[in-house]
Structure formats: C-alpha cells, structure tokens
C-alpha cells in the first residue's frame, strides 16, 4: 500500500494568519485524507467506482455543512475553515471533494438559507452525519450555462405538486436520499423542491464512461409525474438567484479545493525531481525543471492569498458573486497548468496510477467546467467591471 508523503507548501508563511482552530480543522482533514483516501483512491478511480465507505469519515471531519450552525448538526465553523477542509479533501481527489461540496453548499445550504424551521430540523442533522446524502438538480440536458432556460416544471394539483423534467451531470445522484430540484411553477418562476428517493416516478440513472471524476458518482435526475408534498417547497427564496446563491458557496469551496490538487501535483513533482537522476545529477538541478517548479510554487502562493482574502470577505458576508467567480476561475486554471507541468517533470511515469498527477489532471478538466464554465466566469468578471452584459 502506497504511503502518502505529502508536505504542504506554504511559501509565504500563511499559517501565521490562521487561527489555532483553523489549523486543527485542516490537520484533521489532512490526516484523514492520508489515512483513508490516498491508499485507496487510485484503485477506485481505475474501477470508476465511488468508495461509499468514506462517507462516515467525511462526516467525522466536519466536511458536511461545516459552517451550518451546531443546533442543526453542523460544526459552526467559519468560511476559511470550510475552505481548508475542501483544500485537503481535493488534495486527495476532486471527486471526493465534489461529494462534500454538493452535500454542504448545494443541499444543506439551501435548506438552511431558503427552507423553513421544520425542513431544517428534519433534514440537516441527518445530512450532517451522512445518514442522508443529497444531490442538486439545476443543469439540464439542454440548459447548462443558461439555467434560466430550464424546462423542468411543476403544477399545483391541490394537495401536492406534480413535477416533470430531467437533470443531467448530477454528482451524488445515483445514491442520493434527497435532491434539491429547481423547477418552474405555472407562472414560470423558479423554485426549489426537496424530492425524496422512493417518490413514484423519480429515478437516478448513473452516468458511465467518464474519463474524469471517475471516483465520483455522477448521474441523472428524472421526474415523471412525481408527486411532491407541498411542505417540500423551499419557501424563503425563489427565482434564479436562489440556486445561484448555492453555487456561490460551492464555487468558493472549489477555489480552495483546486489549490489542494495543485499542491499535491507540485509536491509530487518536486520530490520526483530531487530523486530522478539523469546525466549524473537530479533533474531538479536543471534550469528548465527549476523554472517549472518555481512557477508552480509562485502560482500556488498567489492562489492561496486570493482564497484566504476571499474567505475573510465571506466571513464578513462581503464577498460578491463576481469575486467568487474570479477566484474559482483563476485557481482552477492554475491547478490545471500545474498538473500538466508536473506530468512533464515525471515524464512517462506521470501518466501512470503510481502517481496522482494524471488523475488530478483529468479531474480538473471537469472542475474547470462545472459550477460555471471557465468562459462564463470570465464574462461574469467582464460584466462586473464594465457594467455591460455580454451573455446575450
């Protein structure tokens, strides 16, 4: 069994800015990843199978709703702690982080923010322990970057709603117990519904043949005349801004998570470059390899500073959607480039499952697209700085 030798880079001594609690939270997540993820993840990725046995461990390190108040089963942590947990989990694997992101930001967050007290008490404690696992249904087969064009809809049938439609590319779908589903009412207004497994007409077929996020369960949500109790409507926010608010939280977590993937690639490449001998010396002694490594640590450090400042703003509830988009876009692009450069340092060994780099690279090809594509985030920044909408 492979030993996880990861050492976290901290070139600008950012640890000095973290509280003791934040460092303890990070170390707990890091230790768990080393013990329970690193030894198994290559095998599960090769098999294209999600390791369901890790769900309890994710709950134990507070990965499910870490910022949710303790009276609802969360850990009551701040946003930087949430980011650090996502960083450490994605250092292990983007797919595992996706599972935690969906549960926290796309399922627990809307129930906490948009639900009523009865819904919070019913679902959040079980979601925080992993007894319930959730999915988030926004993207449709014909509506990805333009979610407002969704065709999923529900009708008021008097004592219940009748839901029809389909959602695609849904993490956790194959095994979810509940799904937060966004659909239009008879007036075309978007609302969130809590759909539970077992409701007649609700199915979750799994998506196969993925080259990316292979250790994550992805599927569809299909609704064929599903009777949804009226008490399952999220009452406190409607319109497209409701699901976009959830995505802000998820994108924030991704901005930290991508740093974890980049750090793992850098650490692997640095260690390999010091050990690999060519032309009678370690390849770390050659200028072109040093250039790659120096640029990696520079970009990681810039991303760390970006995420940390964004976390400070999030803690004050001052982070804008555009600021979150910038961090998500920048940090995922940074991680992808580092993964590609790290693969080159390892040469042919970089494509094997003996090292994590190629798996990270493939995973990041999904991360750069989901929760808003790379180009869409660029246009969000463009809109914010010019005031001119380039989407239409």
Image (tube, grey):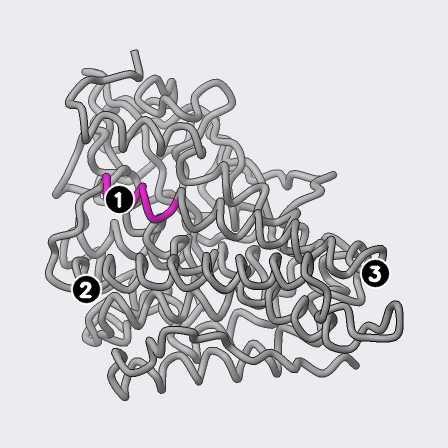
The disc, 1 or 2, on the residue closer to the chain's N-terminal end is: 1
Please state if 328 lies on the left or on the right of 216 as rendered. left
Based on the displayed image, in which of its 4 quarters is residue 158 positioned?
Answer: top left
Q: Which of label 1 and label 2 is nearer to you? A: 2
Whether 44 is among the magenta residues is no
Identify the residue under disc 1: 232
Foreground residue, 308 or 175? 308
Identify the residue under disc 2: 312
Q: Please report the bounds of the magenta region as a residue range.
A: 322-328
User: Could you say whether the residue bearing mark 1 is in a helix, strand or loop?
Assistant: helix
Look at the magenta stretch and give its main secondary structure: helix
Residue 255 rendering spot, x and y as whole percentages: 38, 54
Residue 371 rendering spot, x and y as whole percentages: 41, 40
> How much space separates mark 1 and mark 2, taking CA atoms?
34 Å
Looking at the image, can residue 106 be seen? no
Identify the residue under disc 3: 349
Based on the displayed image, in which of its 4 quarters is residue 92 positioned?
Answer: bottom right
Foreground residue, 185 or 61? 61
* Label 1: few (<14), some (14–19) or many (≥20) C-alpha neighbours in 10 Å: some
* Label 3: few (<14), some (14–19) or many (≥20) C-alpha neighbours in 10 Å: some
Whether 327 is among the magenta residues is yes
Identify the residue at horizontal 65%, vertical 58% (top origin).
50
Residue 23 rendering spot, x and y as whole percentages: 34, 83
Q: Which quadrant is home to the N terminus?
A: bottom right
Please state if 88 lies on the left or on the right of 264 as rendered. left
Identify the residue at horizontal 21%, vertical 38% (top origin).
242
Q: Which of label 3 and label 1 is nearer to you? A: 3
User: Could you say whether the residue bearing mark 3 is in a helix, strand or loop?
Assistant: helix
Q: Which quadrant is home to the C terminus?
A: top left
């Amino acid at each position: 069994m492979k030993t996880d030798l990861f050492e976290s880079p901290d070139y600008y001594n950012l640890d000095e800015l973290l509280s003791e609690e934040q460092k303890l939270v990070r170390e707990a997540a890091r230790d768990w990843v080393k013990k329970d993820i690193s030894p198994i993840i290559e095998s599960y990725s090769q098999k294209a199978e999600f390791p369901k046995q890790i769900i309890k461990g994710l709950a134990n390190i507070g990965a499910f709703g870490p910022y949710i108040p303790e009276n609802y089963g969360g850990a009551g942590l701040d946003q930087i702690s949430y980011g650090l947990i996502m960083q450490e989990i994605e250092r292990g694997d983007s797919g595992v982080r996706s599972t935690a992101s969906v549960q926290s930001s796309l399922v627990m967050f809307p129930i906490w923010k948009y639900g009523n007290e009865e819904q919070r008490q019913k679902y959040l404690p079980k979601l925080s322990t992993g007894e319930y696992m959730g999915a988030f249904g926004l993207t449709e087969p014909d509506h990805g970057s333009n979610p407002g064009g969704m065709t999923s809809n529900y009708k008021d049938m008097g004592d219940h709603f009748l839901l029809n439609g389909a959602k695609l590319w849904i993490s956790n779908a194959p095994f979810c117990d509940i799904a937060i589903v966004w659909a239009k009412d008879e007036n075309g207004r978007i609302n969130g519904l809590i759909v539970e497994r077992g409701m007649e007409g609700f199915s979750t077929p799994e998506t196969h043949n993925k080259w990316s996020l292979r250790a994550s369960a992805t599927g569809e949500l299909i609704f064929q005349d599903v009777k949804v109790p009226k008490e399952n409507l999220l009452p406190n926010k409607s319109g497209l801004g409701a699901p976009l608010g959830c995505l802000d939280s998820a994108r924030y977590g991704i901005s930290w998570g991508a740093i974890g993937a980049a750090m793992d690639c850098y650490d692997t490449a640095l260690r390999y470059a010091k050990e690999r001998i060519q032309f009678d010396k370690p390849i770390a002694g050659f200028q072109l390899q040093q250039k790659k490594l120096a640029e990696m640590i520079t970009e990681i450090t810039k991303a760390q500073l970006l995420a940390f400042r964004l976390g400070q703003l999030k803690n004050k509830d001052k982070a804008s959607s555009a600021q979150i988009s910038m961090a998500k876009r920048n940090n995922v692009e940074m991680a992808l480039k580092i993964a590609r450069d790290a693969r080159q340092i390892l040469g042919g060994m970089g494509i094997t499952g003996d090292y994590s780099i190629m798996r990270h690279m493939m995973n990041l090809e999904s991360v750069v697209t989901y929760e808003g594509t790379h180009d869409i985030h660029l246009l969000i920044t463009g809109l914010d700085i010019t005031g001119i909408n380039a989407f239409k």
